[in-house]
């Protein structure tokens, strides 16, 4: 369960960083937006690295990229009034279905063994 929390944190920080970049560029300080983006992306990759200790890489990376894309698309429609046409909604549904199928078809990695010194 702990590794899925790292996975969720990786996704949320990726989305926050990407949105900060756009927000800073159009609604405030570009420098501040870029600074927040860099910090969030470092946190995102760090959390992703922790998640893949137990979650298979294909599942973790697929979820990170795909759910990040879905959340960025939805947040961009809400925050920046970007278009959210029916074809985008269908694409989002297909992305989520793909993530679920990928996760269902992949076993979790075995737990790490403690090495005795």
Image (cartoon, grey):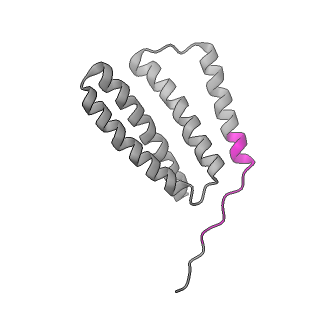
Q: Position of residue 100 (x, y in %)?
A: 68, 40
Left or right of residue 102: residue 65: left
What residue occupies the far right of the structure in this picture? Answer: 105
Q: Position of residue 42 (x, y in %)?
A: 39, 47
Q: Position of residue 35 (x, y in %)?
A: 29, 37
Left or right of residue 97: residue 40: left
Left or right of residue 56: residue 17: left
Compare residues 41 and 19 and report the one nearer the observer.
41
Q: Relative to 105, is 21 above or below?
A: above
Q: Position of residue 47 (x, y in %)?
A: 46, 52
Q: Relative to 82, is 61 above or below?
A: below
At horizontal 71% and vertical 56% (from top left) the residue drawn is: 107
Quadrant of res 41: top left
Main secondary structure of the magenta stretch: loop
At horizontal 40% and vertical 18% (from top left) the residue drawn is: 80
Q: Relative to 36, is 28 above or below?
A: above
Q: Magenta region: which residues?
A: 100-112
At horizontal 54% and vertical 31% (from top left) the residue drawn is: 69
Quadrant of res 85: top right
Q: Is residue 110 magenta?
A: yes
Total marks in image: 0
Q: Is residue 91 magenta?
A: no
At horizontal 66% and vertical 65% (from top left) the residue drawn is: 110
What residue occupies the far bottom of the structure in this picture? Answer: 117
Query: Split into 4 quadrants, where in the image is the N terminus?
Result: bottom right
């Amino acid at each position: 369960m702990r590794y899925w929390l790292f996975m969720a944190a990786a996704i949320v920080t990726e989305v926050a960083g990407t949105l900060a970049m756009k927000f800073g560029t159009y609604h405030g300080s570009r420098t501040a937006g870029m600074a927040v983006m860099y910090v969030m992306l470092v946190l995102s990759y760090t959390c992703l690295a922790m998640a893949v200790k137990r979650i298979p890489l294909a599942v973790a990376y697929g979820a990170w990229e795909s759910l990040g894309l879905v959340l960025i698309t939805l947040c961009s429609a809400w925050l920046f009034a970007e278009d959210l046409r029916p074809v985008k909604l269908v694409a989002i549904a297909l992305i989520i279905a793909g993530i679920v199928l990928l996760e269902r078809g992949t076993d979790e990695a075995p737990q790490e063994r403690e090495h005795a010194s």
